[in-house]
Image (cartoon, helix red, strand yellow):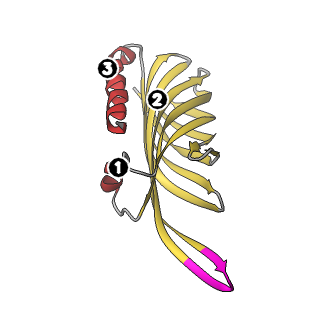
Amino acid sequence: MRKISLFVALAALLMLAPALYAQDHVEVGVFADWTRLSTGNIDKNYVGVGGRVGFNVNRHATIEAEGTWDPNRAITFVSNTGGVLNTYSTDLHLVNFMAGPKFQTSGPVRIFATVKGGLLNFNYGNNSFTSQVNGVPDGGTHGVLYPGGGLEAYLGPIGLRVDVGDEIYFSNGAHNNLKVSAGPTFRF
C-alpha cells in the first residue's frame, strides 16, 4: 500500500511539472544534511547527503520534493542489568523523502519558510543505498512533518541555501529532531 501511495504522489508531481515549469523557474540543489536524532534514550548525530527539486508556482511560492540518505552510523547501547555491563552495537541508516510548499521573499537574498510531509525510514544493517530504498515499504518507516525555514543567496542562477527545521517523525507519539542542511542551488 505504501508503494502505491508513494507512486501516486510522485506521478502527481511529475504531471504537474510541465505546468509549473511554464511559470518561469525550476530550482535544483544538492546538500549535506545533519540530523540530531532523538529516539528515547539515544541522541546521535547523523550526517548525509541529499537532493532537492522545486517548481516555482510564482515569485513567492515553490513546490519542492527532496530526499536524503544518512549512511552507516554505529550506535552503542550500554545497559547495566543486575550488575552486568552489556554493550550492543548496531548500524543505523536513515532515508528520508519529503515534499511540500516553500514560501519565500524575492530578490537575490531570500528568507523562506517551508512545511513538508513525507516518510523517514530507519534501517539497521543495510549497507547499500539501493537496498535501503527498496526496504522503505517494510517496517521502520514512519510519517514525517518538517516545519522549517532558512536563507538563500543567489548570484545569477547559482545560489547557496541553508535550512534549519524540526523533523518530527511519528512512532508511538511525535519525536522532534533538529535538522540542518546546506548546499548549492541552481535556478533555470
Closer to the camera: disc 3 or disc 2?
A: 3
Mark 1: secondary structure: helix
Furthest residue toward front: 82
Q: At label 2, which amino acid type do we have?
A: Glu
Residue at x 50% of width, y 28% of height: 100
Q: Which residue is mark 2?
A: 64
Q: Which residue is mark 3?
A: 15
| For discs 3 and 1, the disc positioned in front in the rendered view | 1
First to last magenta residue range = 78-87
Q: Give me the residue at 35% from left, 21% from top.
A: 17
Residue 94, position in %: x, y? Answer: 47, 53
Q: Residue 2, located in which quarter of the rendered image?
A: top left
Q: CA distance from mark 1 to mark 2?
A: 20 Å
Q: Nearer the viewer, residue 84 or 103?
A: 84
What amino acid does circle 1 point to? Val
Nearest the eye: 91 or 104:
91
Q: Which residue is mark 1?
A: 133
| Farthest-out residue, right | 83
Residue at the spot 36% in from the left edge and 34% down from the top edge: 6
Q: Percent from the top left, x then y, of residue 37? A: 60, 54
Q: Is 181 situated left or right of 158 in this image?
A: right
Mark 3 to mark 2: distance in Å?
Answer: 14 Å
